[in-house]
Image (cartoon, rainbow, N blue to C red):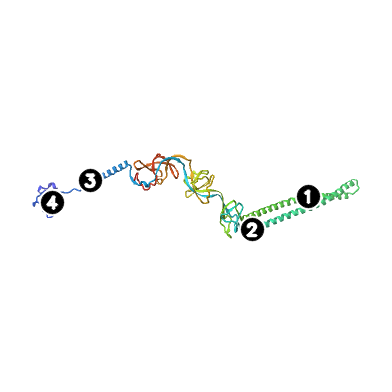
């Protein structure tokens, strides 16, 4: 629409826009006023979107250039005090993989004293700590039930023995009676036999009658049959009586065995030392009642010692009977040992092993004493070694700070192999003679280069 207005109208509109609040133009400093003095310049904003975008792009470019520069000169730097660091030198030396373990001294053999039969403590013959010999009485228990069983068993045994003796007496009496009967029968058989043979001759000569002949013959035959039947009956009765006697004797033997068992049980009420050694525990008091199988004490064989130690489960597949170990110096002397037993059960991340000394034993060692030793996992051989230190907790042996000639330390990736409590075996990343910071890296943060002051 402005294009259709006349020129005079446009000029009037211009003046109105330039007028002040009163509608008139602003006076010029010379006192007069003109049309030019009525116009005002519009200012442009300083922070335009274009300028802001340019500034952001510039800042990003500066940051990128700073990061590239920092990377080219060694990454993030950190100033540290040199006297607070531990520096170790990489060197070639003998290396042996081992685990450092702590164990306790135990007797070579411990025998526990258990109550074979329960009873009441009547007497205590020795005290704890006493040296005893095998078979020495230690204490005596009493058990009225066992004593009553022994009396009953003895009574039954004696009763059965009496029965056997009565049976034997009857057999002997029957045998005696039978011998008497047989003797009488033999006498009659002999007498009637002679008479019968004489009557046979006389009967053939018809000197005696048939009746007289038959009478002597019948008498003779009767005594022969009587003897035969008597002997058969005696044999049958003897077999039956012998069988009965055998059963009764077997019963006597069983009763005697039962009596002996009860007698041995009563003998067990006197607790004796099974081996020679030191009575290290005797947990009894006068008048106490102990049930069968209860623990009364123990005896330690002190002719030798063994070491019981817990080993980290990390080594469970690498520990076996016959493996070697060496104590840390005891009174300045190291003592060789060998593994005698490995317990497969793992508790709280550890499994137990038993070891015994090879040759001499440290003097004056006592039960329960602590022994520290090295459990050897490999033979000794030369390797590139890095002393172990606090840095391993942070890096796990994957990288270290290596000192340079200009007084700085730079981060370097490495690879380690076997290890022991003192050294790491370096496989890659380091050379002999290089110096490495082996103290803790916890305060270094993400630094890639350390400046030593």
Rate crowding at label 4 as few (under 14), some (14 to 19) or many (20 or more) other CA atoms within 10 Å: some
Comes first in the chain, label 3 or label 2: 3
| Mark 3: secondary structure | helix
Q: Mark 4 falls on what kind of element?
A: helix
Residue 162: percent from the left, percent from the top? 71, 56
Q: Secondary structure at mark 1?
A: helix
Q: What is the C-alpha distance between the residues marked 3 and 4?
A: 32 Å
Give the mark toward the camera: 2 or 4.
2
Q: CA distance from mark 2 to mark 1?
A: 50 Å
Provide the residue designation for mark 2: 147
Residue 187 seen:
yes
Residue on which the image places disc 1: 231
Q: Give the residue drawn at x 88%, y 50%.
A: 212
Residue at label 4?
18
Q: Residue at x 64, y 58 (%)?
A: 147
Mark in front: 1 vs 3: 3
Marked residue nearer the N-terminal end (2 or 4): 4
């Amino acid at each position: 629409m402005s294009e259709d207005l006349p020129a005079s109208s446009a000029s009037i509109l211009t003046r109105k826009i330039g007028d002040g609040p009163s509608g008139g133009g602003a006076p010029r400093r010379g006192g007069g006023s003109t049309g030019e003095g009525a116009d005002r310049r519009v200012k442009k904003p300083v922070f335009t979107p274009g300028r802001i975008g340019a500034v952001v792009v510039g800042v990003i470019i500066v940051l990128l250039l700073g990061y590239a520069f920092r990377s080219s000169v060694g990454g993030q730097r950190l100033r540290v005090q040199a006297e607070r660091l531990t520096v170790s030198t990489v060197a070639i030396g003998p290396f042996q993989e081992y685990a450092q373990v702590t164990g306790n001294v135990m007797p070579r053999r411990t025998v526990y004293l258990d109550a074979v039969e329960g009873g009441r403590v009547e007497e205590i013959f020795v005290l704890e700590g006493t040296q005893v010999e095998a078979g020495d009485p230690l204490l005596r228990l009493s058990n009225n039930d066992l004593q009553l069983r022994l009396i009953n068993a003895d009574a039954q045994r004696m009763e059965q023995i009496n029965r056997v003796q009565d049976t034997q007496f009857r057999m002997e009496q029957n045998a005696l009676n039978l011998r008497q009967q047989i003797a009488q029968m033999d006498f009659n058989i002999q007498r009637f036999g002679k008479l019968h043979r004489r009557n046979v001759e006389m009967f053939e000569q018809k000197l005696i009658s048939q009746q007289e002949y038959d009478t002597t013959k019948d008498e003779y035959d009767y005594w022969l049959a009587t003897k035969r039947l008597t002997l058969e009956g005696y044999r049958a009765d003897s077999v039956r009586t012998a069988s009965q006697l055998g059963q009764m004797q077997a019963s006597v033997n069983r009763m005697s065995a039962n009596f002996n068992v009860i007698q041995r049980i009563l003998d067990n009420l006197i607790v004796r030392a099974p081996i020679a050694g030191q009575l290290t525990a005797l947990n009894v008091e006068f008048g106490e009642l102990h049930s069968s199988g209860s623990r009364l004490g123990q005896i330690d064989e002190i002719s030798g010692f063994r070491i019981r130690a817990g080993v980290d489960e990390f080594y469970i597949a690498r520990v076996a009977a016959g493996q070697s170990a060496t104590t840390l110096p005891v009174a300045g002397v190291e003592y060789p040992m060998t593994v005698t037993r490995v317990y497969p059960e793992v508790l709280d991340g550890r499994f137990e092993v038993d070891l015994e000394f090879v040759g001499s034993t440290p003097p004056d060692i006592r039960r329960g004493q602590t022994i520290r030793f090295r459990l050897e996992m490999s033979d000794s051989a030369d390797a590139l070694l890095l002393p172990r230190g606090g840095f391993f907790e942070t890096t796990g042996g994957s990288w270290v700070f290596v000192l340079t000639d200009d007084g700085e330390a730079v981060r370097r990736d490495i690879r380690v192999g076997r290890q022991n409590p003192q050294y790491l075996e370096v496989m890659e990343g380091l050379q002999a003679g290089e110096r490495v910071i082996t103290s803790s890296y916890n305060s270094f943060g993400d630094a890639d280069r350390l400046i030593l002051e």
